[in-house]
Image (tube, rainbow, N blue to C red):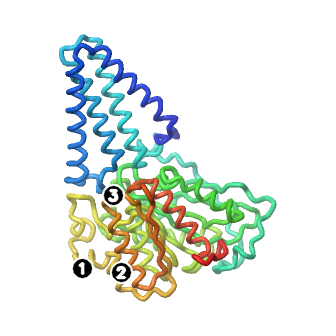
Amino acid sequence: MLEVSLLSVRTLAPVYTVAGIGLIAVTVLARRRLWWLLGGAVLGAAVGALLSWWVGDVLNLVDVSPSWVDRFWVSAVLAGFGVAIAAAIRGRWLVRLVAGISVIVFALAGGLAINRDAGFYPTVADAIGLSHVKPIALPAVTSGSTAFRPDLASSWQAPSDLPEKGRYGSIKIPGLVSKFAARRAIVYLPPAALIKNPPKLPVLIALSGQGPGAAPANVIEAGRLVSRLNTIAKANRGLTPIVVIPDQLSRPTNNPMCVNGRLGNSSTYLSVDVVNWIHKKLNAQTGRQALAISGFSQGGTCAIQLGAEFPQKFGSLIDVSGQLGPVLDSGQDTVKLGFAGDKAAYERAQPLNILDRNRPYKHSNAFFAVGQDDSRYGPDMPVVSQAAREAGMDVTTLIVPDSGHDWATAGIGLQAGITWIMPRVGLANPTPEA
């Protein structure tokens, strides 16, 4: 049950079907009060639209403007509530019973639809705060040079025992230096990392966003990163970077903003503890060119923060739908809670200031992507990407068409970013565009 997907059509279709049957049943049973039912539906839909606007746009309680899918389902659910309430008023006991059950099903159907759009809780385990990703047994670290190999794609000969797909699983990466209380990370090993004598490979750190249900597993489930990585590996004879997805949050509703402070020493955890663990536990290449950092939403903001702050560690970065800079949710004092009231420390953590402080970047690569319909963070991407370009980074940008601030954008953006990064980390032959 823990592994049941809350994003799959197979799970959602039965709930939608029951909700539809419930709406029809209520309407049939109370058909003599049809105008009441119609009025309840219109009033409920109007309240839903107003609620979406007030909570999402005015109060900004979820830190991103609701998508049209979210707005539709909130209005649809409350329209269903309106029909059920109108039918139950002065209705017989059977009508009230069916209406009551229908309200529950309507709420469930709407919640699942909104969850599917946002990708908050990919599985039942995620919804109740449990990790369902099985532990991974890492291959032994082999001897040999760990130096960056820009010509690996040219010299690589795929062996006969090359697996068709990569393997992933969860593992603990302790915060030995930072003391950061991170949840279990996820590691993806491409087919080339699973052979008897694997080559040393570059590594990509990938970060989830922050919000309800946020966890490393979001990247592989809502973002479908494993299947996307397997597609890239198939096109490149089993080669992709090893991907490490650590927890930069500690818990879903916590946002340390990838700095060191009262909310957790997230910066040191990612730039020191995770990096040290990678070089100790994986068959990984060393050197800045062999290590990249990426992320979606808050994770994308972390990617530009850390990639710009530590160019000696991260040679490339992928920022998908990141913010202009680290910030807490609406209603919270970012400077007070995240920076102990130190406005100067807050300013130092802003990507634009980091880029200006550390320029020029002579050998750093940056990929930025954002959804075409992302009205909240979409305007930030050209500002940050242009600042990175002016600071000397080799910059590429992508606008994902017909997409907002969601995991569809994240998955497409990360896949495009990893494809873009392949020749830059020696895993694909360079093209004129690269």
Relative image position of residue 342 (x, y in whole percent) = 22, 75
Q: Relative to 61, does residue 12 appear above or below in the rendering?
A: above
Check disc 2: other Cα within 10 Å, few if <14, some if 14-19, many if 20+.
many
Q: Judging from the image, what secondary structure is the residue with disc 2 in?
A: helix
Q: CA distance from mark 3 to mark 1?
A: 22 Å
Check disc 1: other Cα within 10 Å, few if <14, some if 14-19, many if 20+.
few
Q: Does residue 272 appear in this view?
A: no
Name which of mark 2 and mark 1 comes first in the sequence: 1
Which of the numbered marks, if any, corresponds to residue 354?
Answer: 2
- Residue closer to the observer: 7 or 128: 7
Quarter in which the C terminus is drawn: bottom right
Q: CA distance from mark 2 to mark 1?
A: 13 Å
Instruction: Residue at 24%, 19% (x, y): give it.
Output: 34
Which of the numbered marks, if any, corresponds to residue 189?
Answer: none
Label 2–label 1 contact, CB within 8 A:
no
Which residue in the protein does label 1 denote?
344
Instruction: Residue at 27%, 59% (x, y): give it.
Output: 329
Label 3–label 1 contact, CB within 8 A:
no
Q: Judging from the image, what secondary structure is the residue with disc 3 in?
A: loop
Q: Judging from the image, what secondary structure is the residue with disc 1 in?
A: helix
Q: CA distance from mark 2 to mark 3?
A: 23 Å
Left/right of residue 98 with respect to residue 359 in the rendered view:
left
Name which of mark 2 and mark 3 comes first in the sequence: 3
Which of the numbered marks, if any, corresponds to residue 254?
Answer: 3
Q: Does residue 155 appear in this view?
A: yes
